[in-house]
Image (spheres, rainbow, N blue to C red):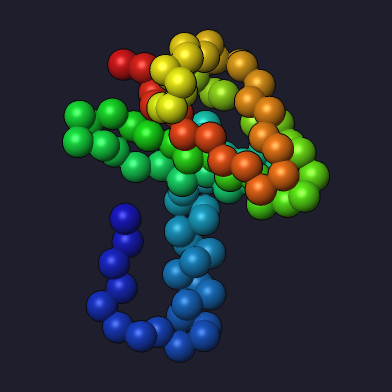
Amino acid sequence: MTCVGTVPDLATSAALMGWAVEVGEGTSAWTPGTESQTVSTSTNGASERVHVIHNWSWEPSVFTVPGAVRAAVSGEELAEGTELKLGAWDARVVIEKA
């Protein structure tokens, strides 16, 4: 997490974002599989890592799970490498297995 205690000008904002992207590259396997996907990660009250995978498109997409998880809604266990099929404007919530 980076906190900026000011409202930076355009050049400073660009430099800060460039730095953040460079520092953050490769720090997580939970990256979108396509341009239409986003992955948001948080921690729940049980200290488990929760990932929300969105497909922001009319076209279906596939997300390859980078580690063992369970589906938050169904409880289904998913092994590393499992392909999640996302429909149009679909989302899946998964919880990392400890």
Q: In this view, does 88 lie to the left or right of 4?
A: right
Which residue is most to the front? 74
User: Is 50 placed above or below 5 here?
Assistant: above
- The residue that appears at 39% across and 23% down in the rendered structure is 96
Residue nearer the viewer, 79 or 30: 79
Circle count: 0
User: Is 49 on the left or on the right of 71, as rendered?
Assistant: left
**Res. 53 image quadrant:** top right
The foreground one among 87 and 35 is 87
Q: Decide if residue 28 is on the left or right side of residue 45.
A: right
> 49 left or right of 93?
left
Kindly identify the residue that appears in the image at 53 percent across and 64 percent down: 18
Please provide percent x and percent y for residue 41.
41, 42
Relative image position of residue 54 (x, y in whole percent): 58, 44
Residue 64 pos. (x, y %)? 63, 25
Q: Is residue 45 above or below residue 1?
A: above
Q: Is residue 28 visible?
A: no
The vertical placement of 91 against 74, above or below, is below
The furthest residue to the right: 59
Question: Which percent across, then down, holds residue 48?
Answer: 28, 29
Q: Which residue is drawn at 45% across and 69% down?
A: 16
Q: In which quarter of the image is the N terminus?
A: bottom left
Tell me what residue is drawn at x 34 percent, y 42 percent: 42
The quarter in which the C terminus is drawn is: top left
Q: Can residue 90 be seen in this view?
A: yes
